[in-house]
Image: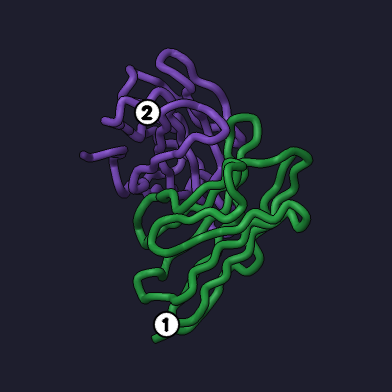
Amino acid sequence: NAGVTQTPKFQVLKTGQSMTLQCAQDMNHNSMYWYRQDPGMGLRLIYYSASEGTTDKGEVPNGYNVSRLNKREFSLRLESAAPSQTSVYFCASSEARGPQATIYFGEGSWLTVV
Amino acid sequence: AQSVTQLGSHVSVSEGALVLLRCNYSSSVPPYLFWYVQYPNQGLQLLLKYTSAATLVKGINGFEAEFKKSETSFHLTKPSAHMSDAAEYFCAVSENYQLIWGAGTKLIIKP
């Protein structure tokens, strides 16, 4: 059981380049999330998808776009990377988007923008 | 808006000693509270969560946390630390169907 799988694990980009982080979950979850993690700041929600066909902005959406391709897959795109987007990115999923929901995380994608 | 404060970005304990990681939240309504653990180079996984069923919540790997409304706290404890407990621990509170995260506490275990 793979859980939440995200690729790539490591990526170095030049300022202005674009890239897409891929995420897939095999738990038949309805809700999916993209977070970024920066030292001393905990996790910050970038975008989420409460169910297939819907996406909504989180706390820090600027500079990012997302696509909920189907129930399994939720991708995050950086159209024009900036050094401020250097971070660790986590994809996550939950069965439903409720206050008690347990969120399951992927192993992270380390992105460096130079 | 709710907030979560974790006291101490780093906590160091000796193997076999009590682990105490502090978490305080701000909320005007009964909250849903979570502790997640992140091992090096891995994603986060749920340790335990409070959903108002009981104030003392038991989680995985021998951890437990007690919800104290009067102190707006949800501290994480473990009676005896193991080397394998070395990780970063995050407290979170649920607000409007989203999790508000603390900054995290790195637990260091001294042999």
Helix, strand or loop at label 2? It is strand
A57 to the left or right of A66: right
A58 above or below B24?
Answer: above
Task: Give the amino acid type for the residue marked by disc 1 in the picture.
Answer: Glu
Residue B23 quadrant: bottom right
Closer to the eye: label 2 or 1: 1
Spot the residue most to the bottom: B111
Helix, strand or loop at label 1? It is loop
Pointer 1 chain: B
Q: Position of residue B103 (x, y in %)?
A: 59, 56
Between A14 and B47, the one lying in front of the other is: B47
Spot the residue most to the front: B54
Q: Position of residue A57 (x, y in %)?
A: 57, 26
Disc 2 and disc 1 in contact, CB within 8 angstroms: no
Q: Read off the residue under disc 2.
A: A75
Q: Which chain is assigned purple?
A: A
Question: Which circle marks residue B15 in the picture?
Answer: 1
Residue A8 quadrant: top left
Name chain B's colour. Answer: green
